[in-house]
Amino acid sequence: MEGQTLSALPDSLLLQILEWLPPRDRLGGARVCRRWRRLVRDKFLWRHLDLTPYKMSSKALWHLLRNHLRGSLRTLKARGSLHSTRKQEVFTPALMKALGKQCPTLHHLCLMETDLRSLSYDSLPSSLTTLELSCCEISSLWFKVPETSQTHTAFPRIQHLVIRNVPSFSNQHLLNISVQGTLKTLVLSEAYRVTDAGIQAAAPHLGDLEHLALRRCSIGNLVTHFIGPHMKRLRRLDLGGSSSLENIGLPCLTSLVGLEDLCLESCHRLSPEAIVAVCQKLPQLRHLDLSGIEVEDLMIHKIRAGLPSCVVTNAVSAADSSVESAQ
């Protein structure tokens, strides 16, 4: 390759190189020459866009939409200004409407630190199937779809919903999205307003769910009584951080015969014997996560011997290991 330059590479290879660049550097490449300017405008580069490292403004998003994202965008990740001193609306109803109209292939939207209370749920692009909200604020009417079928078509049919540290997300929000009957993945982390009662109301509508995570929610032993009978298609179940979960709640999980991955991280009230008794009745189980649970090495060996077809993880967190070393 001695004497070779980037200009000698074919367009297809240059596009793959440009795709690895952050969006800001990618846009800067348009100033190199006419050829690079043409390549930077190629739709291939703007299928998956991660803007979370930047403080975005509505003006900057409009510029990207008009010049690069039309007809190509599939995944958009962006950060708002919820935790900044100078708060401003980044995702306006007009911007969302334009995204839905000009980016019909947009299926995955991830928003972080964004105030969405002035944005109605029906303003989201109807093409969305995956929605992730982290550290956001939403109104009490979010996820609610009117009963009229004529309006229903304008709403996104969310199949994969991820909620992380959204303080206002409540039992009612959970019911609103569940009754639509489209969910296959539901991940709730630090959703403290979601309780056993909320899971009970939503469970009959979650029969097609394949992945459920309830991490550090306000749930107890009753939650497994609603998961077991109604969510028989589950392949992954994560109850990590459920400090109130006790042995009495585990037997209800034995009806999940297709379960492949079970996480009981930091569920300190569960005994190893009760865990093994349940897991031995799950024929498809391939991974069991017991991280953060104090289990003696001898007992871990017994658990692994009792579950020969299952990988058992029992990692100690960095905080725990530092305490042990200090002692």
Image (tube, rainbow, N blue to C red):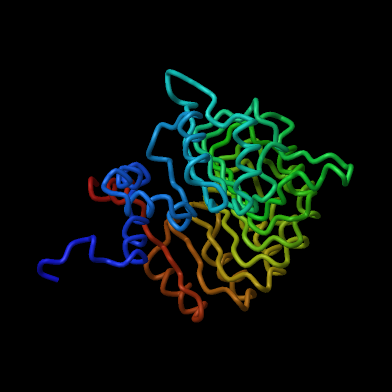
| Residue 156 horizontal side relative to residue 27, left or right | right
Please give the count of numbered marks on the rendered protein: 0
In front here: 26 or 6?
Answer: 6
Q: What residue occupies the far right of the structure in this picture?
A: 148
The residue lying at 60 percent from left, 60 percent from top is 237
What x and y, as percent, mark residue 293?
45, 56
Q: What residue occupies the far front of the structure in this picture?
A: 34
The residue lying at 59 percent from left, 34 percent from top is 95
**Is residue 223 visible to us here?**
yes
**Is residue 245 visible to us here?**
no
Q: Quick check: 298 above or below 156?
A: below
What x and y, as percent, mark residue 243?
55, 46
What x and y, as percent, mark residue 198?
74, 43
The residue lying at 76 percent from left, 53 percent from top is 203
In front here: 219 or 37?
Answer: 37
In front here: 228 or 92?
Answer: 92
What x and y, as percent, mark residue 79?
47, 36
Q: Quick check: 86 above or below 311?
A: above
User: For residue 97, which quarter of the picture?
Assistant: top right
User: For residue 270, which quarter of the picture?
Assistant: bottom right
Q: What residue occupies the far left of the structure in this picture?
A: 2
Q: Please identify the quadrant where the N terminus is shown.
A: bottom left
| Residue 131 horizontal side relative to residue 27, left or right | right
The residue lying at 64 percent from left, 27 percent from top is 117
